Image (cartoon, rainbow, N blue to C red):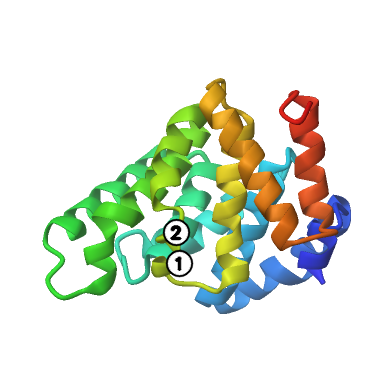
Amino acid sequence: MMGTSFFQGEYEAALTIYDEHIFPSLRTSGAMLDVVDSCSMLYRLRMEGVSVGDRWRDVLPITQKHTRDHVLLFNDAHFLMASLGAGDPQTTQELLTTLQDASKSPGENCQHLLARDVGLPLCQALVEVENGNPNRAVELLLPIRYRIVQVGGSNAQRDVFNQLLIHAALNCTSGTHKNVARSLLMERDALKPNSPLTERLIRKAAAVHLLQ
């Protein structure tokens, strides 16, 4: 229900569902699925310019406990969304540093083996976007675009990273990256025709003169 509200652009309805259902479930269970759902929805809304207020501060104490876990890179990226959204640089740095350490001594851990080439660039891209460096975020994300499937999560869950790349490319000053944005939107429209979300992204591109 909440996902439908978001994709339709019904932001207030999405926030209401979050407040009345998604976050209460997270607060009660602390389950990883609820963590991912909460972080992903808040981040998707934020990318579209929706103010989520102090909601990240409520999520952070739950995700913070897992900062050093590094069980699944997909989860790490969502924990990072929370620390960035809540404005907690200490937790952000702790996650990045310990993930880098794990990547240096991966052993036979598949996720740690992926950390250097996929997980860390993905996480750093989130940081670059937060710091207002969309060009650098695109430079980090584009080479790993087809490897993000390896970090875990479902196709629908990982779409937040596709949206991250598109939003970053739309906000770039680089002409090359603007061409990337145009190509990504054409591809998304072909793969997901009649998608309200894609239509909103195309309107955003038109507003910054990418599709003229």
Q: Amino acid at mark 1?
A: Val
Determine the residue positioned at 50% across, 74% down: 32
Q: Vertically, is 199 above or below 171?
A: below
Quadrant housing residue 13: bottom right
| Residue 152 x %, y % | 44, 71
Is residue 165 found left or right of 207 in the rendered image? left
Determine the residue positioned at 82% across, 47% down: 199
Determine the residue positioned at 77% across, 51% down: 198
The mark closer to the camera, 2 or 1, is: 2
| Residue 40 x %, y % | 61, 59
Is residue 164 found left or right of 131 in the rendered image? right
Q: Split into 4 quadrants, where in the image is the C terminus? A: top right
Instruction: Return the residue at label 1.
Output: 149
Q: Nearer the viewer, residue 93 or 106?
A: 106
Instruction: Return the residue at label 2.
Output: 146
How packed mark 2 is, by other alpha carbons closer than 10 Å (few <14, some 14-19, many 20 or more), is few
Q: How many numbered discs sit on the rendered protein?
A: 2
Q: Nearer the viewer, residue 200 or 85?
A: 200
Q: Split into 4 quadrants, where in the image is the N terminus? A: bottom right
Q: Vertically, is 10 above or below 207?
A: below
Q: Vertically, is 75 above or below 51?
A: below
| Residue 8 x %, y % | 86, 57
Q: Vertically, is 6 above or below 181?
A: below
Determine the residue positioned at 31% across, 67% down: 69
Q: Nearer the viewer, residue 180 or 113?
A: 180
Decide: marks 2, 1 in contact (CB < 8 A)?
yes
Q: Which SS class for mark 2?
A: loop
Q: Is residue 41 visible?
A: yes
